Image (tube, helix red, strand yellow):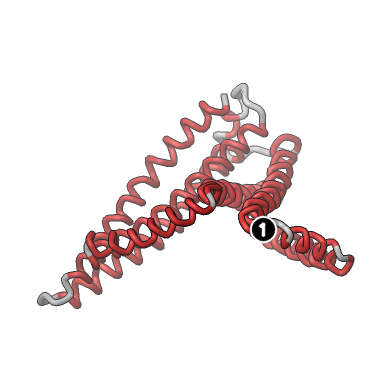
Amino acid sequence: MLTTLMKYEFKAVGRLLLPLYGAWLIAAVMLGLSIGNSGNDGSVLFITLSSILYAGACISAVILTAIILIQRFYKNLLGSEGYLMFALPVSTGRHIANKVVSGAVWTCAGIIVAILSGLIIAVTIEGFTSVFENMDFIVSDIKYAVSREPSVLLVIPEFIIVMLAASASFCAKVYAAIAVGHQWGNHRVLGAILAYIGFGIVETTLGNLISMISDFGVIDFILDLLDSMHYMTQMHLSMLMAFFAVAVVAAIYWFICWILLDRKLNLE
């Protein structure tokens, strides 16, 4: 049932975000072409207009992505649609997981589109030949690194997994803050904002406490242990530790959200 929920969630969000991301990429093409043809008459005006269009598309995509993901969570699970959603034979935990996974994927999709837009601008300005000549140097460096250490190829999927986990942690934090704010009656938006700020303060405090552990030699021991390992082993272990850290944080926020939605839910 979770896969069915995710299927419909991706379709619903995709209908809104995919045209927005498409417009972002089109704006990138226009900006690159305007800069590439800067020697023509009227180029200054064209560059100015295309720059404004690209900046507007970029800002709109970021803001609307956040609004849509938040709105989907609030309306589906905390608003009037919640009666229908919670009538489905799906546990509260799976409803939350559906929103967190969808939010994480679309957040990463936005990052990928941002990277693609930058690449499109570079290609339209410099031309395919120039860009791919530079990429040949990168590819040759990668081939050389792989020939010496094949496990370097694992760094890319490891990084993607950590990025997805970090995005899931961020989304779970936002949803948990919304769930806390929902308990505030007529001041739900204020409650959500204060909850998000409070979560940030708690994270900072815990981070400072963990850093204080180094006074007892624990951090020094871990660093010495890493120094004794092969550099690629250090890389893989660092990725694993990063994934574990963000996964634990995501699980905590998921649990907070689950407690409030499963035990203290008050639908509108």
Q: Image quadrant of residue 115?
A: bottom left
Q: Secondary structure at mark 1?
A: helix
Does residue 196 appear to the left or right of 108 in the view shown? Answer: right
Does residue 236 appear to the left or right of 66 in the view shown? Answer: right
In this view, the residue in front, 243 or 238, is 238
For residue 187, say whether it is visible.
no
Residue at left offset 63%, top offset 32%: 94
**Split into 4 quadrants, where in the image is the N terminus?**
top right
In this view, the residue in front, 93 or 38, is 38
Q: Position of residue 222 (x, y in %)?
A: 78, 59
Q: Amino acid type of disc 1?
A: Tyr
Q: Residues within 10 Å of mark 1 (few under 14, many from 20)?
A: many
Q: Can you identify the residue that label 1 sits on?
A: 196
The vertical placement of 114 against 85, above or below, is below
Residue at left offset 61%, top offset 24%: 87
Residue at left offset 62%, top offset 29%: 86
Does residue 208 appear to the left or right of 101 in the view shown? Answer: right
Q: How many marks?
A: 1
Does residue 68 appear to the left or right of 58 in the view shown? Answer: right
Residue at left offset 59%, top offset 34%: 82
Q: Position of residue 264 (x, y in %)?
A: 74, 39
**Split into 4 quadrants, where in the image is the C terminus?**
top right
Q: Image quadrant of residue 219?
A: bottom right
Q: Position of residue 166 (x, y in %)?
A: 60, 52
For residue 106, say whether it is visible.
yes
Q: Position of residue 105 (x, y in %)?
A: 50, 44
